[in-house]
Image (cartoon, helix red, strand yellow):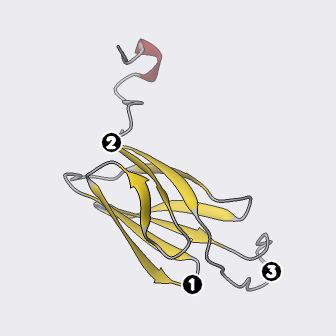
Amino acid sequence: EIQKPSTTGSYSLIPIAYGRVDFDGSIISATSNVSVTRVSQGVYDIVVSGVTSSCTIIAYGGETTTATYFTTNTCRVTNHKDLYDGNETIERTDTDFYFIIFQP
């Protein structure tokens, strides 16, 4: 049984969605409440049904993968060809990745 420890206060650490996505945006495996769209090369949107406020996402597809909250029920995952140092435009590249989404 998973219980929310008191140290997290009002934030839940129980995931509302998780999965694995292939480089072309197709779902390899995931909870039934998500859909994934490959927006452009190296950019993917994950839509979670039933989410009505902001969410937190953790994603891993390699050291150049970033994940952010995008809109009310959408998180965006972006993979760059190289590490971005803030001074140059880095080309994006497709990758497979894992994700976990929480709603605090």
* Comes first in the chain, label 3 or label 2: 2
Residue indicated by mark 2: 16
Q: Position of residue 77 (x, y in %)?
A: 52, 66
Instruction: Answer left or right for 22 relative to 72.
Output: right
Identify the image quadrant of residue 45: bottom left
The circle on residue 41 is 1
- The residue sitting at 38% across, 38% down in the picture is 15
Which sits in the foreground, 44 or 7?
44
Quarter of the C terminus within the rendering: top left
* Comes first in the chain, label 1 or label 2: 2
Residue indicated by mark 3: 87
Q: Position of residue 44 (x, y in %)?
A: 47, 72
**Mark 2 residue type:** Ile
Quarter of the N terminus within the rendering: top left
* Comes first in the chain, label 1 or label 3: 1
- Camera-side mark, 1 or 3: 1
- The residue sitting at 46% across, 72% down in the picture is 25
How would you rate the neighbour count of disc 2 (Cα within 10 Å): few for under 14, some for 14-19, many for 20 or more? Answer: many
Which sits in the foreground, 64 or 69?
64
Q: Residue furthest front?
A: 28
